[in-house]
Image: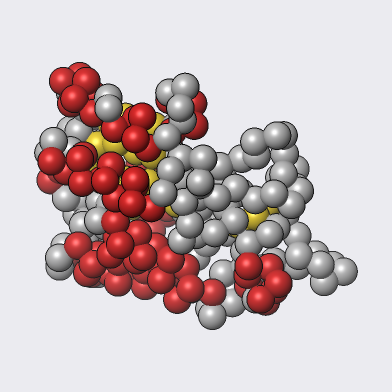
Amino acid sequence: MSYANFKNILCFALLITLFITGCSEQEKTSLTGKQALVEHPEWTKSANIYEVNIRQYSPEGTFNAFKKDLPRLKKMGVDILWLMPIHPIGVKNRKGKLGSYYSIQDYKGVNPSFGTLDDFKSLVKSVHEKDMKLIMDWVPNHTAWDHPWVSEHPEFYAKDSTGAITYEADWTDIALLNYDNKELWPKMIDAMSYWVEETDIDGFRVDHAAHEIPMAFWEKAIPQIDKQKK
């Protein structure tokens, strides 16, 4: 598979999911090579994926409320649950009363409206007990304006002509990250690894996987995160 084709696949809706168990020895070949081969794990093939919006799924809008429906979803034939971002939402420059899931205030945090970290771990455990998989949305392209990195590591962000941290399109509620600064890379990989080690999730659906983010980052990130599930 060519680099161009692989990049297009990453950009295509559900297929931008990066499954952390999916790196075989063949996949270790550089993704920027002319014939890089990508081997996906068996559990991703011919699988039914069900997207979950925790906030709108139930009147309670919590992990525990959603967990009650796992038997029904299993009976429906769902194989993989894909959760929209579960992190705290930024307050600064927030759009609307509730804000966007994709304005991430803390990569290692849980939106308190959804429940606690232990509640989320319990959900993942229950999903696995029903022989299902759980992946979560990951947003590596940008953060909220009140993410700690904005003040602690402003060098991680893209800047406009005046030197101010900038955003993309009309998304004024987010601050754009700059992957030209490779000091950002281990920080992002560490945050992704946290969810694998701490909660035993099965993978990520990556938002903007190949937009503003170089393929070289994923060449480094995927093998490191993949090791966590072996």
Q: Is residue 108 left or right of residue 17?
A: right
Task: Tell me where residue 229 appears, x and y as whole percent.
Answer: 19, 62
Q: Is residue 112 above or below residue 149?
A: above
Task: Tell me where residue 22 appears, x and y as whole percent.
Answer: 21, 56
Q: Is residue 200 above or below residue 60?
A: below
Q: Quadrant of residue 221?
A: bottom left
The answer, for residue 204, to whether it is visible in the render is no
Task: Tell me where residue 67 appears, x and y as whole percent.
Answer: 29, 32
For the C terminus, the quadrant is bottom left
Q: Is residue 159 left or right of residue 121?
A: right
Q: Nearer the viewer, residue 37 or 182?
A: 182
Q: Is residue 212 left or right of residue 68?
A: right
The answer, for residue 196, to whether it is visible in the render is yes
Q: Nearer the viewer, residue 224 or 54?
A: 54
Task: Tell me which residue sits at (45%, 76%) in the image.
Answer: 186
Task: Tell me which residue sits at (53%, 78%) in the image.
Answer: 182
Task: Tell me where residue 38 appears, x and y as whole percent.
Answer: 24, 56
- The colour scheme used to paint the residues is secondary structure
Q: Quadrant of residue 115?
A: top left
Q: Is residue 94 left or right of residue 33?
A: right
Q: Nearer the viewer, residue 167 or 98?
A: 98
For the N terminus, the quadrant is bottom left
Task: Tell me which residue sits at (70%, 58%) in the image.
Answer: 145
Task: Tell me which residue sits at (39%, 32%) in the image.
Answer: 52
Count of numbered marks = 0
Q: Is residue 183 above or below residue 204?
A: below
Q: Residue furthest right?
A: 162
